[in-house]
Amino acid sequence: MGRLPKTQPPCSFLLTEPPVNPEIAQVRQEFQQRLAAARDAAALEQVRIDFLGRTQGRIQDLMTRLASLPKEEKPAFGKDVNELKREAQAAFDAAKTRLESA
């Protein structure tokens, strides 16, 4: 696998409406920054592990936190985390495809 060209624009996946919860917004921002900075396969894989990993990923940590929230906050929080996970996975897959084709 090659390196991403330096002219490659940074990842620009954004939720159309920012999540209400600041924790989710922070994880989203950190993911975007780390994904944009990943210039090789090893760095990209580390982003996947750190954010999308099933055991220690930051998004999984948010899902685990869902259990401790008050009942009335769970639906919105869960919806925002699920949307973040879907969009983060799509952005990761796109970055991986770009890297493999470079």
Image (cartoon, rainbow, N blue to C red):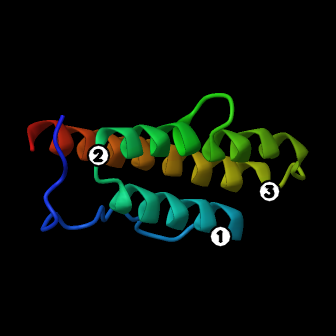
| Pointer 3 or 1: first along the chain | 1
Nearer the viewer's eye, disc 3 or disc 2?
Answer: 2
Q: First in sequence, mark 2 or 1: give its number.
A: 1
Q: Residue at x 83, y 55 (%)?
A: 72
Relative to 47, residue 30 above or below: below
Q: Give the residue pinned by disc 2.
A: 40
Q: Nearer the viewer, residue 69 or 48?
A: 48
Amino acid type at mark 1: Val
As drawn, 66 above or below 17: above
Mark 1 neighbour class, 10 Å CA radius: few under 14, some 14 to 19, many 20 or more: few
> What amino acid type should be assigned to the residue bearing mark 2?
Asp
Q: Nearer the viewer, mark 3 or mark 1?
A: 1
Q: Give 35 or 27, whichever is nearer the viewer.
A: 35
Q: Which residue, given by chain and number where applicable, does mark 3 sit on?
A: 73
Question: Which image quarter holds the N terminus?
Answer: top left
Q: Residues within 10 Å of mark 3 (few under 14, many from 20)?
A: few
For mark 1, what is the residue?
Answer: 20
The x, y position of residue 49, in whole percent, is: 53, 37
Label 1: element kind: loop
